[in-house]
Image (spheres, helix red, strand yellow):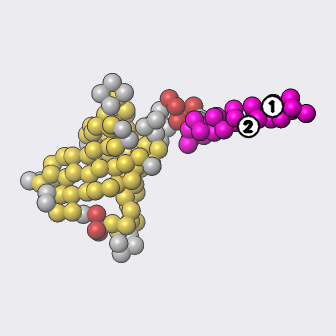
Amino acid sequence: MNTIRLKTSALSIIGAILFCFSTPTNGSLPDITNPYLGEYECKNATLGDKDYMPYFTDIRLELKSDETFSLRYQTIDGRKGEETGKYTYNPQTQTVCLELGQGVKRCFPLKKGILSISFPIGDKLLNAQFEQR
């Protein structure tokens, strides 16, 4: 009887240790080999000194495993839009290069799950930060 309790206690302790150190993802191979894949939520977007986040209810960027991306947004008045294109990821420089259909290609840093976008539009600078979900 004591050996059964001892074995049950040992199994319980091992289970608790494994549970404490388990990862929140399902541990699939793409999650491990390509951690940059997935959806990113825009946390801030400015053009010059003007904050554009109050005009949107949602802005999301998704990097897909087939090396395509989609940028989806919804304005506060309910209008939805989507832009798509191709991307590449460079693990050495930790940059994502986004390319739209018109041949426009820009590279941005991706560090610790945050994609920082910055480029000039006219005489103003667009800055946006996307956080991985």
Residue 31 image offset from top left, x and y in percent: 52, 36
Residue 46 image offset from top left, x and y in percent: 21, 57
Q: Which residue occupies the foreground of this view, 28 or 5?
A: 5
Residue 98 image offset from top left, x and y in percent: 32, 41
In the rendered image, the vertical position of residue 125 relative to residue 96, given as above or below: below
Residue 127 image offset from top left, x and y in percent: 22, 51
* Tag shown at residue 100: none
**Residue drawn at 46 percent across, 39 percent down:** 37
Question: How far apart are the two marked residues, 2 and 1, measured between alpha carbons?
Answer: 10 Å
Which residue in the rendered view is the most extreme toward the top?
92
- Asked if one can make out residue 84 in the rendered structure from this viewpoint, the answer is no
Which is more N-terminal, label 1 or label 2?
1
**Residue drawn at 26 percent across, 51 percent down:** 128
**Residue drawn at 45 percent across, 49 percent down:** 133
Q: Which residue occupies the foreground of this view, 59 or 104?
A: 59
**Residue drawn at 33 percent across, 38 percent down:** 110
Which residue in the rendered view is the most extreme toward the left?
123
Mark 1 surroundings: few (<14), some (14-19) or many (≥20) residues within 10 A? few
Q: Are marks 2 and 1 in contact (CB under 8 Å)?
A: no
Which residue in the rendered view is the most extreme toward the front?
2
Mark 2 falls on what kind of element? helix
In the rendered image, the vertical position of residue 117 relative to residue 54, given as above or below: above
Mark 1 falls on what kind of element? helix
* Tag shown at residue 6: 1
The residue under label 2 is: 12
In the rendered image, the vertical position of residue 34 relative to residue 77, given as above or below: above
- Asked if one can make out residue 40 in the rendered structure from this viewpoint, the answer is yes
Image quadrant of residue 69?
top left
Amino acid carrying mark 2 in the image: Ser
- Dominant secondary structure of the residues highlighted in magenta in the image: helix
Which range is magenta? Answer: 1-26
